Amino acid sequence: MKLDVNALRYLSKEDFRVLTAVELGMRNHEIVPAELVDRIARLKHGGTYKLLKNLLKHKLVHHDSSKYDGFRLTYLGYDFLAIKALLNRGVFSAVGRQIGVGKESDIFEVLAEDGTILVMKLHRLGRVSFRAVKSKRDYLCHRSSYNWLYLSRLAALKEYAFMKALGEHGFPVPTAIDCSRHCVVMSLVQGYPLVQVKQLQNPDDVFETVIGLIVRLAEHGLIHCDFNEFNIMIDDNEKVTMIDFPQMVSVSHRNAKMYFDRDNECVFKFFRKRYNLSYEEEREQDEGSASVAGEERDKLRFSSIEKSAGFLDKQLAASGFTRKNEDDIQKYIEGEKEGSDDEYDEDDDDNEASDSESVGVQISSLKMADEPEESSSCNDVGVKEEPLVPGNEE
Ligand code: ADP
Ligand code: MG
């Protein structure tokens, strides 16, 4: 999806007030009736309807009259709210080029006020719409608080919380700078994802560092769950940085051992294939009886690791990421994995969150808004009422 931040320049304070009112209305309405938007916005001189029309023109809200007449945010509208909150907080002053696009995220460079280039990751859960949606929809329908905006916000909050906690424990991760809604701002990692690096000077060292990270994570009670050549960045000095944390789990998770093994296996496979390296563990696996000993040893190692579970709860709660949040997002991620063999389609370019709009859900726990308050943000910095600094042309 193209993120055109130019419209930010033309939106007035009142426009944002109305956009925020739609966001607030979505706490307990799938579609927010215009009258309710008007009541929440409480504009001194009225004009909500006209402003809604303007937001509609810029595709920041979507008009829906299928069940009853009303409006809801589009992903673009949600982007604008997050970007404006971060601009107002002075986290960055301009949005630059897109540097990454994942299945469920868009990554942009942003410019901090001191000239530093940072990275903004916008989570877009549910962007990919599966053709075999029926089971998926049923799955989502039965969970009352599910909504793509809510889930994307959780993904961002979780990513921010993990990045911060991991950074504080000396792990090589980007510096977590701030987050708002579905948007995380972090430092720019120099270098490239391992998958793009044609040659390494010291593949053995990099391999050991990477495997060492998996083990160290587990010693802290955590499993990355998507530890592969796409989420490991390498700089010119072959320094490793890991990224992408929304799917991490605690070692107390019921499938922890499987996830732990899978992360290890991904790394082994990659290095075996690309760098032709062979490792002791691999040989043991091949030698039948020895593999039993290997498994036993792994089990032992893992059970000692399991004792360190608890990091998750304590450290993450500090960032406002709760156990309920974790349960909600984990249900989604695990549901996704089950459906990941389905064929999928990119959404149309209406910036819509897949077919989620037709899922009859309410977002009871969605906490949002600049006005009167910022979303249940990880970093409770008050939002200043300053004129908007526009993003640049990109
Ligand atoms: P996804 O969840 O969509 O996989 P990632 O966090 O893995 O998103 O980011 C996707 C891509 O964006 C990465 O492979 C990397 O190329 C780039 N990227 C993400 N974060 C950073 C960062 N902090 N610095 C530099 N590049 C990044
Ligand atoms: Mg990734």
Image (spheres, rainbow, N blue to C red):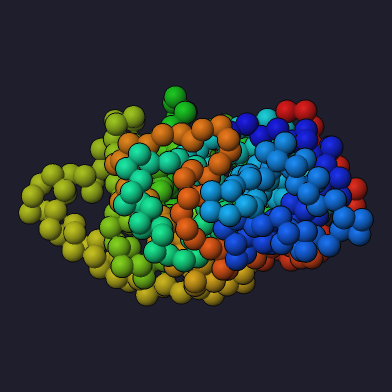
How many numbered markers are drawn?
Answer: 0
Task: Depth check: give the residue in front, 33 or 147.
Answer: 33
Q: Return the residue found at the far top.
A: 198
Apparent side of residue 324 relative to residue 307 in the rendered image (left or right): right
Image x and y of residue 9, in percent? 84, 37
Q: In the picture provided, is 261 more to the left or to the right than 380?
A: left
Query: Which residue does the image show at 54% across and 48% down from the upper left?
Result: 66
Placement of the C terminus among the 4 image quadrants: top right
- Residue in the image at 32% along x and 36% along y: 343
Q: Compared with residue 360, is residue 364 higher up or lower down, i.e. above or below?
A: below
Any part of residue 110 in sight: no
Which x, y percent locates residue 131? 35, 39
Which quadrant of the frame does ligand 1 lie within? top right
In the image, residue 173 lies at what x, y percent?
Answer: 57, 50
Residue at the (67%, 38%) spot, across then down = 59
How far across and down, in percent of the image, does residue 47 sit?
85, 51
